[in-house]
Amino acid sequence: MALGRVQIEGVAPELDGGRFPVKRVIGDDLVVEADLFADGHDQIAAVLRYRPAGEAKWQETPMEPLPNDRWRASFPLEGLGRYQYSVAGWIDPFRTWRREFEKWVEAGDQVLMELRVGAELVEAAAERAEVSPGGLAPGDGELPNDPATQLRRWATRLRTWSADPSLEDDPSSLLGPDGPTKGELAALMARFPDRTGETRYGRELEVVVDRERARFSAWYEFFPRSTAPDSSEHGTFDDARRMLPYVREMGFDVVYLPPIHPVGRTNRKGPNNRRTAEAGDPGSPWAIGAKEGGHKSVDPRLGTLEDFRRFRAAAEAEGLEVALDIAYQCSPDHPYVEDHPEWFRTRPDGTIRYAENPPKKYEDIYPIDFETDRWPELWQELKSVFSFWADEGVRIFRVDNPHTKALPFWEWTIRELKETHPDLIFLSEAFTRPKMMYRLAKLGFTQSYTYFAWRNTKAELTSYLEELVQPPLSEHFRPNFWPNTPDILTEFLQTGGRPAFMLRLVLAATLSSNYGIYGPAFELLEAAPREPGSEEYLNSEKYELREWELDREDSLRDFIARVNRIRRENEAFHTNDTLSFHAVDNALILAYTKRPSGGGASILTVVNLDPHHVQSGWVDLDPDTVGISGNEAFQVHDLLGGGHYFWEGTRNFVQLDPHVSPAQIFQVVTQGRSERDFDPFA
Amino acid sequence: MALGRVQIEGVAPELDGGRFPVKRVIGDDLVVEADLFADGHDQIAAVLRYRPAGEAKWQETPMEPLPNDRWRASFPLEGLGRYQYSVAGWIDPFRTWRREFEKWVEAGDQVLMELRVGAELVEAAAERAEVSPGGLAPGDGELPNDPATQLRRWATRLRTWSADPSLEDDPSSLLGPDGPTKGELAALMARFPDRTGETRYGRELEVVVDRERARFSAWYEFFPRSTAPDSSEHGTFDDARRMLPYVREMGFDVVYLPPIHPVGRTNRKGPNNRRTAEAGDPGSPWAIGAKEGGHKSVDPRLGTLEDFRRFRAAAEAEGLEVALDIAYQCSPDHPYVEDHPEWFRTRPDGTIRYAENPPKKYEDIYPIDFETDRWPELWQELKSVFSFWADEGVRIFRVDNPHTKALPFWEWTIRELKETHPDLIFLSEAFTRPKMMYRLAKLGFTQSYTYFAWRNTKAELTSYLEELVQPPLSEHFRPNFWPNTPDILTEFLQTGGRPAFMLRLVLAATLSSNYGIYGPAFELLEAAPREPGSEEYLNSEKYELREWELDREDSLRDFIARVNRIRRENEAFHTNDTLSFHAVDNALILAYTKRPSGGGASILTVVNLDPHHVQSGWVDLDPDTVGISGNEAFQVHDLLGGGHYFWEGTRNFVQLDPHVSPAQIFQVVTQGRSERDFDPFA
């Protein structure tokens, strides 16, 4: 039994009934909507409440009514970390009085009495203003110096009017700008409401605020050990430093390195994942740990920790951020195995269980037992791996197979780590069932790998993207599109030739604001699988050193540089929120636009999904999402190929030769927008 | 930092994150689904937990896996009132072991060692069985008398096998029906799982279990005061008793009476809502309260409380249940006004505020102030009105304008009242904005009035019904369709003549499992509005006594009786869950089916929405929802008109003359189903 006549429901954003935070980036406004309503005809008022997590005091901003009992407000996300927010509403008798008073005045009925009712309401507000002269958070207007006195003055005015019988006969002057229902008094009264019967939404919701790179990033993965001038030698961090200008010129902003730790010797795998290694075979970087150390050590063949620091500093100087790969698994030689055998599962004969998926055995890997009796110590140690590298200045981690580790660990460790380093970014490398992938994002991962590599047709791409860019997924799951990885050489790339690489790159880079490639395999069009039907690379760098001829004439480096420059220069590509698809009368052509969220020219990307043949068709643009009127003439500038075209209306023709360029990225330039932009010869 | 590797999300049904209960009726099974999954390849097990609210002990039933990480179980709703339910899941190492063991056996690898692993798991289960031999709730199988001994025996068997090297060479016998992965051991192990790392879903959800009538009912509203043999006299309960056989013969099961309390005299309204009444004008039953009493009293003109008891008993004898109208508002003469002036709002001059909606004034009504300082006493008193009539045996209440009373009052009072009387049914008479209407249902109302009266076209009816019969609405909002009420004489009925009444009745009765009419105005085709454009009846019974000629030849009573008999005899009409629409190539014909939830013949209703002209068209039946194959021959029997038709395939012709019958209600009889049913001359 409790008062609280205002009902609050349908609060958005809200994930799983408030169980998980939503995600935004710094500088965003968090727009919050809710349904608020009360019985009867009384008017209500509402505020959005918010605070940085950990602060006791809530801030408040008024919510504005929309149609159909919906209300909206927003607050600025000015700092990294977590904010909490909620909604409150109350009956506002003065707002009700204003509305009804105006009707009584129009009807010329009981005006004097209603003025007395109003005076009572204003007097009560004056008393509240005396007690706490700060009142409710400002909204738009400024507060006068002495609001209580001001309110008392208004009350007197209302009482004087209520004693003037001539106003009963002709009350129309009361509806003027200086009347009691307009301007000053309304603003003052809104600041000193009676909130004793207020309803608070029963949940305090959270938003995690990340830095901009969480939402917009271009990743380049490479194996530093393949960068030695003499390809028979194991490359070092110093060698890898020479890759940085190359990566930077292509326009990437994150360089991601496979694990840099000492590699195990026991049961080391040979080239092409052969069960035995020859002397000199480098082993897989994911077989982590040797007598030289574990997850907090550097493979001595790459150099020292000092060398890594120099590499990281050099990357930073190039405007590149280093991302490390954290894979929680151990080679049999990892120091944990001797120091903490209790962190692993044993078999009845007392030996440690290596990884298995019957009938397959992975004798070079010991999985960690997250449910060991000593799990609290284990979890602290695992968390400290991140802390160690964070202390070394690393702020981005690509996490290997998080879906095979206890999920409560992730929720705990990411939350804890971000308390200290709210600028951390965690990329979840889970290729598994959808609910698990999405759950990892709910639990705290900043970005996620996706099924993009295997979505090739127009129907597949459209339905997948439409799922990703809308709530609930868009509230927490930030896709990172990779056309290839060291584990994934798709059949499409194996068989599609250079056009396939180009079109998959354009799709990744323009559909998703986060994307990455595994190079130099990608730009050098590496396409041979280990065996037919396999998605493994032949002679994969995972198991051997490779030499890459970066200056090869057919390299896609210039093409990639152009795409990355277009991404960077056009704000439309910095989020996925505005993505929308447009009909094309050819199933092999995909057309979509993105718009800068702050307004401005739309970018229309048109991709020929067929890497073999010229395709053409008519694109039916949705004028509203593109920002054109139904039948005007406008221009499209191909930012990729350089062409300028005059288009008219919503239906226009495109033709794409995959051997020239399988995609066009059009800036849409309407006449109204800028005369200069419209000059095709500018 | 906490273990609990199993993740639980997407629990259904769940309303607003568990804030509100869902609704079912007694005898239903509550089917609960949830997403459950864990990291890695370990197998999991899950239970649905449930208990009647108030009981400390949970019962459990195993959940079964569906595709895509979905799990399902159900529990029987055997009693009225509230049940709680939730979900728990845990890692099941034995299930994982079984699956992997079978693969090792097939691979002929490490079989003996795995048998030892299995033995250890079985021994641990035996220890658990010693501690609590009851184990997990049964699911399907019966538990042996001494499960611990049985498990020990199995452990020994596994150890014996593990010492037999011949099994390493030829382990195939281990996959037989007596092997460790099949039948008995699997069932036993499922009963004694290790649940120390169990995850419980963080919320305990609720379901309200009502009686069958909450879901399936046919209401008849009439004014007892219009039943006197001499129409100039005020009718009494004794007069009204004579209506009961008439109502019963039409096939209704609820008789609903407008307020039966003393009617105020001050500012009494005259016929057609005139501002002043003449001597002898009976006043509006909704102007409640006079010196003879208030909400717990009977209008002396109707009789005594004893007369009401006799009326109720007579209704019960006819198989009819009496529903009362509870309208929380007071005439100026209500005893509350003198005894509790603090329950009303006053104006500055000290007088009580009557109801207003400027510039309109309702001087005959004082609204109750639910926010009065003395609200706790007020709410208790208002609740006691329901208790009073419940003690008089009334179990159904139609609540007048609940959306103009404090909503927290409803949540509190309905919940409290149903603690004592879980068989209570509350019908919400709110015709207002959708979110408010739906919120009232969430807060506890059993059934709700709807927008049905104003949904006339195929598009309107289809989209409205599709919203109503699916979650989330179908979980808590039970529509009650009324083609007319004393307040609502739609333009469609005003202008459509007899066919309009017939088709609106069929729509109400067959689209919605709960429906009602206001009679005898309905069956006697009363169609004159107070003035053009008004939905008020001319000479409305709300303000004057009426005489009804029940035996008029054009009465719809026989037609209504037929429709109600069809509803009663065909289980398909007892819920809305299976409603689905079928395409017709004529926008004026609506076709839809319902199926009995337990299986059986579908009922196809075809309605001509045009009350003026013959309409015909081809119905495209969706074979799956109708239960026919794509091209077989079948029969349809018109339960309403009596015709039998041979149909073939999914596309069939219908033609409806509104002046004969604007609707056909077909039982679909397929050949396979019953030879007898297929005989058209049976």
Image (cartoon, coloured by chain):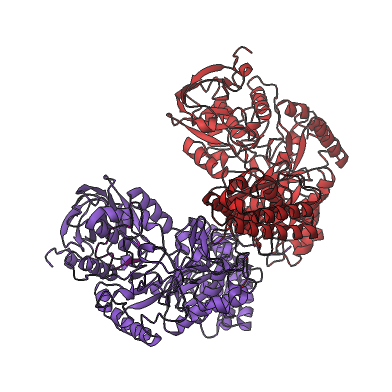
Chain colours: A purple, B red
Residue B1 left/right relative to A508: right
Residue extending farthest to the front is B166
Residue extending farthest to the top is B681
The image position of residue A483, as x and y in percent, is: 33, 60
Report the front residue among B25 and A563.
Answer: A563
Query: Is B91 part of what is drawn in magenta?
Result: no
Which quadrant of the figure has residue A246?
Answer: bottom left
Q: Which residues are magenta?
A: A512-532
Report the front residue among B560 and B541.
Answer: B560
Q: Is residue A56 visible?
A: yes
Residue occupying the point 53% across, 34% down? B492
Q: Dominant secondary structure of the magenta stretch?
A: loop
Report the front residue among B228 and B630.
Answer: B630
Count of numbered tags: 0
Which quadrant of the figure has residue A248?
Answer: bottom left
Placement of the C terminus of chain A among the 4 image quadrants: bottom left
